[in-house]
Image: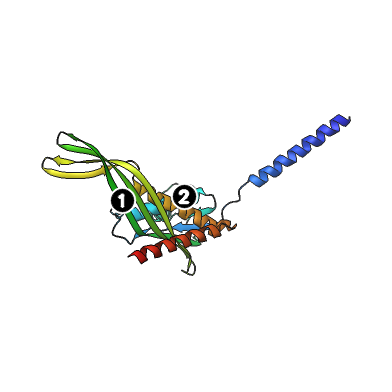
Amino acid sequence: MKLANHTGLLGAALALALTAGGAAMAREAPTMTVAVIDFTNQTSSASWWNGDVGNQLADVLSNELSATGDFKVIERQKIDAVLAEQDLAASSRMRPGSTPHTGNITGAQYLVTGSVAAYTEDTSKTGGGLNIAGFRVGGGKSQAYVAIDLRVIDAETSEVVYSRTVEGNSSGGGVSLSGFTHGVGGDFGHSKKTPASKAVRAALIEATDYLDCVMVKRDGCEARYQQKEQRRRDNDKKVLDLE
């Protein structure tokens, strides 16, 4: 009888522990709503920049913020498609019961954006090239650095509530091909993961970690970013002094 009682108590304790553990592991739904708007470019050295890159960077940062589980990310890049779907629903051309309702688009508490403030790339040829049918194939190494000025804007007051310059560095090798085709000169590099794209990705991940820290976690992690910011400012001062 006593053994049965002990077994029952042990089972109850185990069930309670599992329930408590499950509750602790359950993640609360994010309440911080943000929308990421297109990035801009303020430097002439980013040769990879074109008209669509600002939108692409906003998409990447949106995905990174959403992946943290701490932000409710509101779609703004494709808002026209959402509005078009609602307008179509309001036209009575869609089957009843299958249409989205209007007036339920979630507003963002904060708008997040960034601007490419600096970009440098150092490319060095490694030699060992080969001449093949009039073309020269050679190797090279590149190092890239990007600085992005990040801003978080209160959607209600338009006040900039957070701002920080985030940086990304990368290095890698690539293959270059140069020559003439039908009298037209060509010289271009090819790499699946270029130093530029890796540096930008690194900066956006840093931006995500920073925003997650100062906007959601606030667990003392802010000191680490203050130290990073101070080091960045000190390095900038050294560069300016050298000039």
Which residue is label 1 attached to? 122
Rendering quarter of residue 218: bottom right
Disc 2 residue type (three-letter): Glu
Tell me the SS state at disc 2.
Answer: helix
Measure the C-alpha gap from mark 1 to mark 2: 28 Å
In the image, 104 versus 239, the foreground residue is 239
Residue drawn at x 43%, y 53% is 204
Q: In the visual, does 143 lie left or right of 32?
A: left
State the quadrant of the N terminus.
top right
Disc 1 residue type (three-letter): Asp
In the image, 8 versus 136, the foreground residue is 136
Which residue is label 2 attached to? 64
Rendering quarter of residue 43: bottom left
State the quadrant of the C terminus.
bottom left
Residue drawn at x 17%, y 37% is 135
Give x and y (percent) for residue 28.
Answer: 61, 51
Tell me the SS state at disc 1.
Answer: strand
- Total numbered badges shown on the rendered structure: 2
In the image, 140 versus 67, the foreground residue is 140
Give x and y (percent) for residue 27.
Answer: 61, 48
